[in-house]
Amino acid sequence: MRKNKSELYYSCLLLLLAFWSSTDADITTTDETSTLTSAINQTIESTLSSTTETITTTTKGPNRTDWSHITKCPSNVQCNLLGPDCIECPGYTINCIYGDEVAVTCTAKPGLNCTGPEQFEKRPICRFCYQTEPWEHTCTDTTNCKVVNTTRTSNPRGVYISNCTVKQHILCLGHRTFKKRRKCNWTSGYRWSTTLILSVTLGGFGADRFYLGQWREGIGKLFSFGGLGVWTLVDVILVAVGYVGPHDGTLYIY
């Protein structure tokens, strides 16, 4: 910017000196004065255009520093404990061998207030983020799914789609947030031991089915005296192996 201003002043000074020289030589015709004025204007416009391009390149060029990470990164922590959003590890790419540890030199991004050396070594495993272990990422839970799904005999355990995010200190490749199929794993408070005791002692009156919230089956067992004992015996076996569960499809508390 200072260089462009200096060039502008220097060019104007030379043109003014030329004007004065022409005045001393009695070259003061109207055409010459108009030509000199036009030359001065062109020089000024050219210099200003060059200055504008320089400012634009400095502001929008590929070497412009991105400071958006400052709001995402913590302060007063050790630099080697910063997450992937706060450090740069150029040696950690998809060209690594899957499953191997990769020794990379990482550097804390500029503008961060961290303690210790800003350049350090890390040894992450070569893998994508969706391949991390369950304890290395957190996933959203839901109670809007059936844990026990008897309509699918090959896989009676219900599943749902969860959004998972890798923990901050884990280095991995690809998107740090991904979708994952998880088995339903929640309970409404029904105890397996209580259900089994009711099935053995009062199963002929449908007490086990009433306890599980299956009132239709409970009424059927009550008025049939447990299917003359056959239904009661079958229910004891099904409850014991965990096949018959709560009406809402949740898990037992064991």
Image (cartoon, rainbow, N blue to C red):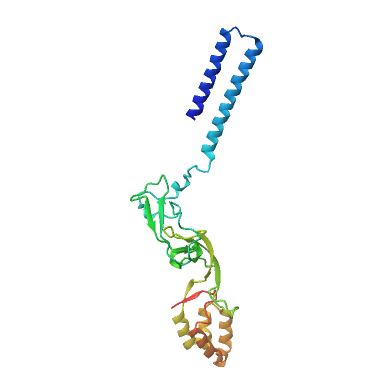
State whether residue 15 is above or below residue 60.
Answer: above
Q: Tell me, yes or no, if residue 136 can be seen here.
A: yes
Task: Residue 112 in the image: state x and y as whole percent.
Answer: 40, 46
- Judged left or right of residue 38, residue 142 is left
Seen at 56% across and 15% down, the residue is 18
State whether residue 59 is above or below residue 74.
Answer: above
Quarter of the view holding residue 42: top right
Q: Nearer the viewer, residue 38 or 238?
A: 38
Quadrant of the drawing holding the C terminus? bottom left
- Judged left or right of residue 3, residue 116 is left
Q: Nearer the viewer, residue 212 or 251?
A: 251
State whether residue 41 is above or below residue 24.
Answer: below
State whether residue 17 is above or below residue 122.
Answer: above
| Residue at the outermost front position | 25
- Judged left or right of residue 86, residue 220 is right
| Residue at the outermost left position | 116
Q: Nearer the viewer, residue 212 or 139?
A: 139
Task: Residue 71 in the image: state x and y as whole percent.
Answer: 45, 47
Seen at 44% across and 46% down, the residue is 70
Total labels: the figure holds 0
Task: Residue 36 in the image: state x and y as whole percent.
Answer: 61, 16
